[in-house]
Every structure is written in structure tokens, then in C-alpha cells.
Image (cartoon, grey):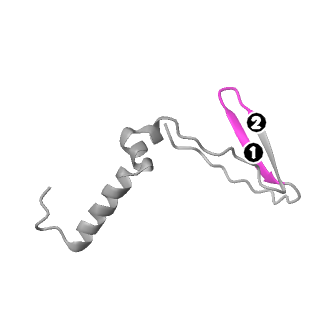
Amino acid sequence: MRTDKVSLRGKLMGDMMRNMMDSAMGRRIQTGELRKNPVEPAWVCPADYEYEIVEMEHFPMEYLQPAKVSTGRVILQLHGGG
């Protein structure tokens, strides 16, 4: 990489990225280890809410509602991923 036209800020950022990539966490990034088995914490239903799984013919739905409040309104959230 040519560095003669890189700003001081660019050089500092490059050094910081190289240092991070050389660390233990960086090694996991370089090898792709962090992407192989992403682990998310288990979801916990918020206090004062009721959670229900509604089984449909082709898919399950999740229904989350406040335990003591009923407004008659609903928000429908559709996941848009593949």
C-alpha cells in the first residue's frame, strides 16, 4: 500500500486497525470464527408482558402484549430476511 498520499488521520486509523487485527479478537475476525457460530443471548420476555406462540398452518407467530393494558391496537411486524 502506498502511504505517501495518506493523511495523518488515515495512517493512525490504519495503525489502529492493524493493532486490533493482531489481537486475539482480531485473529477471530480474520479467520471468520466470529461469523461461523454467532451466539446471541436468550431472549427474555419483559416484565409485565405476556408472551404467547400462536401456531398457524405453515408457520408459528409470536404474540406479545402488556399484561394489564388493553388498547385494542396491534402492531404487526413482518420479518424481512431470507
Tell me the residue that label 1 is attached to.
63
Q: Amino acid at mark 2?
A: Val
- The residue positioned farthest toward the bottom in the image shown: 8
Do labels 1 and 2 touch, CB within 8 Å?
yes
Residue 76 percent location from the top left of the image: 66, 49
Q: Residue at x 47, y 35 (%)?
A: 36
Going from the N terminus, do you reach mark 1 or mark 2 first? 2
Start and end of the magenta stretch?
A: 54-66
Q: Quick one: SS at disc 2?
A: strand
Q: Is residue 10 above or below residue 35?
A: below
- For the residue pair 16 and 42, the one nearer the viewer reads as 16
Q: Residue at x 60, y 44 (%)?
A: 40
Residue 8 percent location from the top left of the image: 22, 73
Q: Residues within 10 Å of mark 2 (few under 14, many from 20)?
A: few
Was residue 61 drawn as part of the magenta stretch in this picture? yes
Majority secondary structure in the magenta region: strand
Residue 1 falls in image quadrant: bottom left
Q: Quick one: SS at disc 1?
A: strand
Q: Residues within 10 Å of mark 1 (few under 14, many from 20)?
A: few
